[in-house]
Image: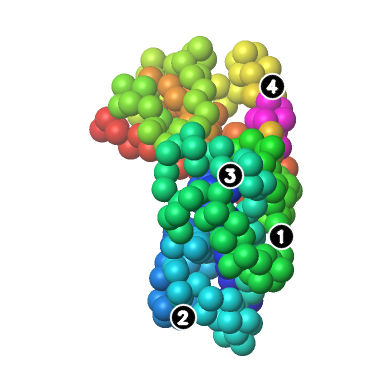
Amino acid sequence: MTSKIKIFIITGMSGAGKSQALKCFEDLGFYCIDNLPVALIPHFLKLVKTQKYLMNTALGIDIREGRYFRGFVQFIDNLKKLGMDYKIIFLDAGDAVLLQRFSETRHRHPLGKNILQAIRQERKILSELKEKSNRVIDTSKITLGELKEILSTMLELKRSREMKLTVISFGYKYGIPLDADLVMDVRFLPNPNYVPFLKNKTGLDRAVADHIKTNSIFRSFIKEYVGQIKNLLPLYIKEGKSYLTIAIGCTGGRHRSVFIAHQLAEELSKSGFSVSEYHRDIRKEIK
């Protein structure tokens, strides 16, 4: 497990965007901790080795650690001895930009004092850590979306197959799944529920599948919809998403939505995407 562990240390100048960077990592599926006390990091890293959900972790460390921060610079030199593969990302911005950001938000600089003096002092304190960083990102002129793209590139999430897809079928009468990113309503297809010998079957049964497949509307729709999803995935990845939930709905969630969700999951799997399939309402109201 140790060889697969990814530890990212997010640090840098106050006001340069560390919190936004951590949010990006969170969106990319990382377990994020902001301002973990340096003294607790060795204990946390021991926990990382034993817990699967902590294998991808991002730690936010900044000047608020005060006198312990200098010890942190020495500590990271020993990380590889602990068998940890880590990378340090240092966020920076020009003094004028940082001064403007503090003025706009009216936040107090962690070092207190005059803001410009505090910025200059912080820059001196962080100089050694900046030199040890694997990547320095200047946020002076980039947007949050551009920051996400930079980080996703660093994490090698540009390949579509690394995105985790979930395809869910559901019934509108029971509500739309709250975690759905994309929702498709397939109630335009003829409802097998009104065919007596299909009523108590589901979209996973061959008889229902054959019934829907004979419909010309279905044949044109599924080809276009699968193509649309495939075209959208690289765009979502570019924006920093590492997972996407696609919900397919019909009236009761047992026939049309189940069949279409199954077809979509199969087509995306054949194309090399990592897909999980879930039919939320398939067993409701079946007697």
Which residue is disc 1 drawn over? 135
Whether residue 116 is visible to the viewer of this picture, yes or no, is yes
Give the CA separation, mark 4 to mark 1.
41 Å
Foreground mark, 3 or 1? 3
| Quadrant in which residue 284 is drawn | top left
Q: Which amino acid lies under the numbered mark 2 shown in the image of this protein?
A: Pro
Q: Which amino acid lies under the numbered mark 1 shown in the image of this protein?
A: Arg
| Residue drawn where x is 57% and y is 61% of the image | 121
The spot of residue 258 in percent (x, y) is 47, 32
Up-down relation of residue 246 to residue 184 (above or below): below
Which residue is disc 3 drawn over? 98
Q: Which amino acid lies under the numbered mark 4 shown in the image of this protein?
A: Glu
Which residue is disc 2 drawn over? 42
Q: Are marks 4 and 1 in contact (CB under 8 Å)?
A: no
| Residue drawn where x is 60% and y is 34% of the image | 264
Residue 224 - label: 4
Q: Report the side of 175 relative to 260 (left or right).
A: left
Return the residue nearer the eye: 116 or 26: 116
The color scheme shown is rainbow
Q: Secondary structure at mark 4?
A: helix
Q: Report the side of 139 relative to 210 (left or right).
A: right
Give the CA separation, mark 2 to mark 4.
52 Å
| Quadrant in which residue 191 is drawn | top left
Q: Earlier in the sequence, mark 2 or mark 3?
A: 2
Q: Is residue 230 magenta?
A: yes
